[in-house]
Image: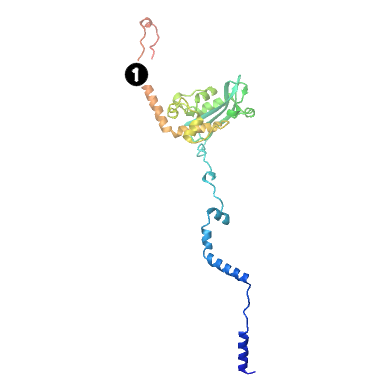
Amino acid sequence: MSSSDLKRKQKTKKTNTKPVQINPNWSLLQQKLKSDSHGNKGNTRKSFSNDSPDNTSSILGKRKERPDSEVDVPKIDPLTPVNDDSSLTDEVAMDCEMVGVSQGTKSALGRVTLVNKWGNVLYDEFVRPVERVVDFRTHISGIRPRDLRKAKDFCVAQTKVAELIKGKILVGHALHNDLKALLLTHPKQDIRDTAEYQPFLKGKPRKSLKHLTSEILGADIQNGEHCPIDDARAAMMLYQKHRKEWEKNVKDQTRMWLKQKKRKPKKKVKQGNASTNDSPLV
């Protein structure tokens, strides 16, 4: 076969070749896929960026943030001592818890606590009253029968407390009740009673220690059974917070009392009693 015949045969074969027929459904599907891909190209990233926060968190598994009120922030107790120095200081705070004796209406010492000016405990003991206890007043005092089985005798506790407060500034709330239960006295000029300090009262006859502690210190005490350690610390902190003004107030009152005493005229002795040896009253 000549080369001219071969070329003619190949040309004839090409002209007789028929195009392959494509299923019309498949053709439509391909066109739809192409149009979708071109239309969404470059928008995929944008669609993710425009998602709402809820969708983003659900897709990425982002942890849901809690509101500020639910964040666990440790609270600092303002009554906690700033150090562990338990030495005897010039200022001592005292608080006592009472139990009921006699018919239950008479109060007797059941526990006594003293802290120094930093709030560290100097003395904290349960005390066995001389009379039989008929009401432990546990809901307030926190004292139970088992607490008094190995408690200190009243005389022992009384002697120890007297030694600790001698010559000291005694701080507390309604201290006359505590001193009465201990059968002790203390110089009036050395008593700093938060129940009687006028700037705390603001026109009211008296405020509770719980109220003063919450209002001035922002601390919460006496929820249920009382803790004499917390109560003594609260009284001491109230005093320390206002110590400068308090001491100035005491000095001013003392100075005024001395002036009034000097100005007080002497009473004249009646002529009928002139022959007696009685000295004139001052």
Who's the residue at 51% across and 61% down the image?
A: 46
Residue that carries the numbered disc 1 in the rendered image: 263
Residue plotted at (37% across, 25% down): 255
Query: Residue 252: horizontal and vertical position, in percent?
Result: 38, 27
User: Which quadrant: the C terminus?
Assistant: top left
Q: Nearer the viewer, residue 121 or 45?
A: 45
Location of residue 159 (image quadrant): top right
Residue 51 in the image: state x and y as whole percent: 53, 56
Q: Position of residue 108 (x, y in %)?
A: 57, 23
Does residue 29 lie above or below 13 as drawn?
above
Label 1 Cα neighbours within 10 Å, binned few <14 / some 14-19 / many ≥20? few
**Type of residue at label 1?**
Arg
Residue 88 appears in view: no
Secondary structure found at label 1: helix
The x, y position of residue 254, in whole percent, is 39, 24
The N terminus: image quadrant: bottom right
Does residue 55 appear anywhere in the picture?
Answer: yes
Depth order, front residue of 204/225? 204
